[in-house]
């Protein structure tokens, strides 16, 4: 947001209130004319979290020797209106309009402004409160990212539907999903998995399981039940991955008629002398 400001002719810094961006001047030698001239910059007044005021350079405008104080005032007002999305009621001179269009185009092209709304109106609707960051404490912090991703993968593979179809109760099914997720993210024993569920992971919250009721004995039983479903789960996962990734199963047949052993193979229960296609008769 720009605010209009009077530009003194003695190259003094401009006095403005806290209304966003404004013109700031400095005396420099213009390399094109060799004369002392006013060099203009756009500067923003901002307030930090502690209430302190600081200035941030927005864009170097350059020399505007052909602009009077009144015209600079109208240029600032015109930029204000353009950023607010308004059009002036009365037409300015060609020179002022050209400056407004040129500076506004530069602001947009160089990404010096990120929106064309009145930031003062937006800030006025906010309820700002100061917070002492040293007084903030974190309690019961849990990891979420890997657990959430693994759970979504299990849902996509329909593991929950398979277990429900095999007669698992909702609690046992959800506990099995939590067990699989935790063993994927943090491979450990059942005892350590319980600790991980209770102290680190957020999987119980995602599945609405009371972490206080989970014990290592429950996880042992869950592991045994999952192992009993091994063949059915493998077939289910084979079908689901084929559907998800559009895979067709291929059967490879290997011809083992020319397979032979080298060595005496005295301790082998299945190795026998047979016909040699290499016409070997030395017994090897």
Image: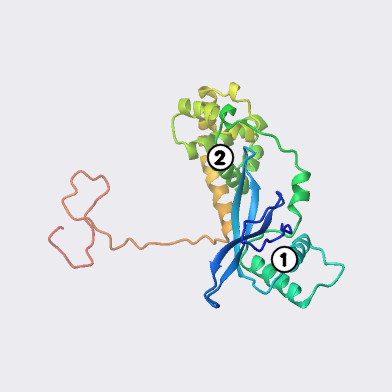
Q: Earlier in the sequence, mark 1 or mark 2?
A: 1
Residue at image point 65% right, 65% down: 107
* Residue 190 pos. (x, y %): 47, 28
Q: Local crowd at mark 2 within 10 Å, few (<14), some, or many (≥20)? A: many
Left of 173 or right of it: where is 4?
right
Q: Quadrant of the C terminus?
A: bottom left
Name the image quarter holding residue 131.
top right
Reply above or below: 279 against 134.
below
User: Closer to the observer: label 1 or label 2?
Assistant: 1
Q: Element at badge 2?
A: helix
Reply above or below: 248 against 136.
below
Q: Local crowd at mark 1 within 10 Å, few (<14), some, or many (≥20)? A: few
Left of 210 or right of it: where is 117?
right
* Residue 224 pos. (x, y %): 51, 31
Q: Quadrant of the N terminus?
A: bottom right
Mark drawn on residue 147 = 2
Q: Element at badge 1?
A: helix
Left of 201 or right of it: where is 9?
right
* Residue 17 pos. (x, y %): 71, 49
Q: Is residue 39 visible?
A: yes
**Residues under labels 1 and 2: Cα distance?**
63 Å
């Amino acid at each position: 947001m720009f605010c209009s400001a009077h530009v003194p002719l003695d190259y003094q810094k401009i006095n403005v209130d806290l209304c966003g961006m404004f013109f700031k001047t400095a005396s420099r030698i213009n390399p094109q004319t060799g004369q002392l001239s006013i060099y203009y910059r756009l500067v923003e007044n901002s307030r930090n979290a502690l209430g302190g005021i600081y200035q941030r350079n927005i864009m170097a405008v350059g020399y505007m020797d052909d602009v009077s104080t009144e015209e600079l005032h109208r240029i600032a007002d015109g930029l204000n209106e353009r950023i607010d999305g308004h059009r002036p009621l009365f037409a300015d001179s060609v020179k002022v309009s050209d400056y407004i269009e040129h500076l506004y185009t530069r602001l947009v092209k160089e990404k010096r402004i990120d929106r064309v709304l009145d930031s003062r109106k937006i800030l006025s609707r906010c309820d700002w409160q100061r917070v002492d960051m040293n007084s903030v404490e974190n309690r019961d912090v849990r990891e979420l990212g890997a657990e959430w991703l693994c759970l979504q993968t299990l849902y996509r593979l329909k593991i929950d539907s398979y277990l429900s179809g095999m007669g698992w109760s909702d609690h046992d099914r959800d506990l099995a999903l939590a067990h699989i997720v935790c063993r994927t993210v943090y491979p450990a024993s059942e005892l350590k998995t319980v600790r991980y569920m209770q102290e680190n992971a957020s999987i119980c919250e995602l599945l609405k399981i009371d972490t206080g009721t989970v014990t290592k004995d429950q996880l042992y039983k869950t592991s045994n039940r999952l192992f009993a479903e091994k063949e059915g789960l493998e077939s289910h996962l084979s079908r689901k991955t084929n559907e998800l990734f559009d895979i067709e199963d291929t059967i490879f047949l290997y011809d083992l008629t020319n397979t032979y052993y080298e060595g005496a193979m005295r301790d082998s229960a299945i190795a026998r002398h047979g016909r040699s296609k290499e016409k070997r008769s030395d017994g090897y």
